[in-house]
Image (tube, helix red, strand yellow):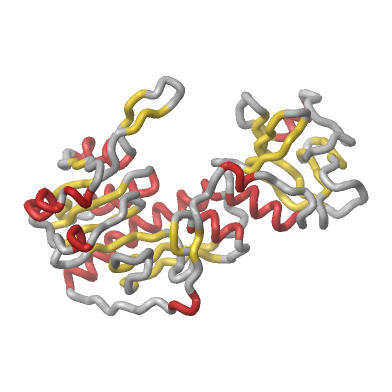
């Protein structure tokens, strides 16, 4: 079975590597165009493009895939596997693959369709999430499901959970292709009544409101770590909060630092407290909150806003 793989970020790299490692016939890779990155705006290929080049695979970085239907048709692939590709596929693009286009989505569909499924699962307080391989349709993440793999969220940050789901997605990619090769496609329709959607995350969504319960704030911190990062205002500058834990309840006003010690920075919330364990000061590097305390940058009685 001839496969075209479409993906862009690091999340999609293990799936491409696993397909090739498993001996699947990946004949081409499609990804987003190179983009300027860093302060010097150096033109940089996507992680998937870099991986494909190392593997010696032909790579197409179409600016608009919908205008490249002839090129896609000439590839002669049976199926396309997509994973965080980043462009909308048209009916003409879908029609280039007689065996269908199959997408690896990082949620237990029909929950969290859309752009931020990993962050949204953490924010919602879900105990589990996973990856779903579904047949791609024109509407957003609505296709019939080929297989599902589950993963416990626990106390993972978004960065940690993304890594786990990336590996899980790689396993799912190989299993999906093997099912398709055998013709063993028992597709399950999604329950539209249970569907939820999630929006693209912005930096503004990370602003912490210490009037909220500590449990909600903790989920916000976990969901936004490492980027774009939850943040608050301290001494007139943004302070990124990259990890935390729940603390013991105590007296104090909302946003007040009630303790600053080797555990970290304990802050009073609307209900309960959080203990900030990792942070990043403005124009600084990521560090343990205890080191921030040792440097006497923060102390009990200070207020975070």
Q: Which of 58 and 23 is in front in this view?
A: 58
Q: From the image, which quarter does the N terminus lie in?
A: bottom left
Q: Is residue 234 left or right of residue 145?
A: right
Q: In this view, does 117 lie to the left or right of 253?
A: left
Quadrant position of residue 213: bottom right
Q: Which of 37 and 57 is in front in this view?
A: 37
Total tally of numbered discs in the picture: 0
Rendered position, 145 above or below 226:
below
Pinpoint residue 235: horizontal percent, then vertical percent: 78, 28
Pinpoint residue 264: horizontal percent, then vertical percent: 76, 39
Q: In this view, does 291 lie to the left or right of 67?
A: right
Pinpoint residue 258: horizontal percent, then vertical percent: 87, 42
Residue at the image point whose x is 90% and y is 51% from the top: 250
Residue at the image point whose x is 70% and y is 52% from the top: 217
Residue at the image point whose x is 22% and y is 49% from the top: 65
Q: Nearer the viewer, residue 53 or 210?
A: 210
Q: Nearer the viewer, residue 96 or 156?
A: 96
Residue at the image point whose x is 23% and y is 46% from the top: 30
Pinpoint residue 201: horizontal percent, then vertical percent: 53, 49
């Amino acid at each position: 079975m001839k496969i075209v793989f479409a993906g862009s970020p690091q999340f999609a790299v293990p799936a491409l590597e696993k397909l090739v490692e498993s001996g699947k016939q990946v004949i081409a890779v499609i990804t987003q165009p190179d983009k300027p990155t860093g302060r010097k705006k150096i033109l940089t290929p996507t992680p998937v493009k870099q991986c494909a080049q190392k593997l010696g695979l032909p790579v197409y970085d179409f600016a608009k895939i919908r205008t490249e239907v002839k090129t896609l048709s000439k590839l002669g692939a049976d199926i396309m596997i997509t994973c965080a590709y980043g462009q909308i596929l048209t009916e003409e693009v879908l029609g280039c693959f007689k065996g269908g286009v199959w997408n690896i989505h990082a949620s237990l569909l029909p929950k969290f369709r859309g752009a931020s499924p990993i962050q949204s699962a953490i924010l919602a307080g879900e105990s589990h999430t996973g990856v779903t391989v579904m047949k791609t349709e024109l509407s957003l993440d609505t296709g019939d499901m080929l297989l599902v793999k589950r993963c416990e969220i626990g106390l993972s940050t978004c960065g940690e959970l993304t890594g786990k789901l990336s590996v899980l997605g790689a396993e799912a990619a190989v299993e999906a292709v093997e099912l398709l090769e055998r013709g063993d496609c028992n597709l399950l329709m999604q329950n539209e009544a249970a569907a939820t959607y999630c929006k693209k995350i912005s930096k503004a969504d990370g602003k912490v409101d210490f009037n909220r319960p500590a449990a909600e704030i903790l989920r916000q911190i976990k969901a936004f770590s490492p980027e774009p990062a939850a943040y608050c205002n301290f001494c007139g500058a943004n302070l990124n909060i990259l990890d935390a834990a729940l603390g013991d309840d105590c007296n104090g006003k909302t946003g007040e630092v009630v303790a600053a010690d080797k555990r970290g920075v304990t802050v009073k919330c609307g209900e309960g407290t959080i203990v900030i364990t990792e942070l990043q000061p403005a124009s600084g590097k990521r560090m343990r909150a205890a080191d921030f305390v040792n440097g006497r940058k923060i102390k009990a009685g200070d207020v975070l806003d």
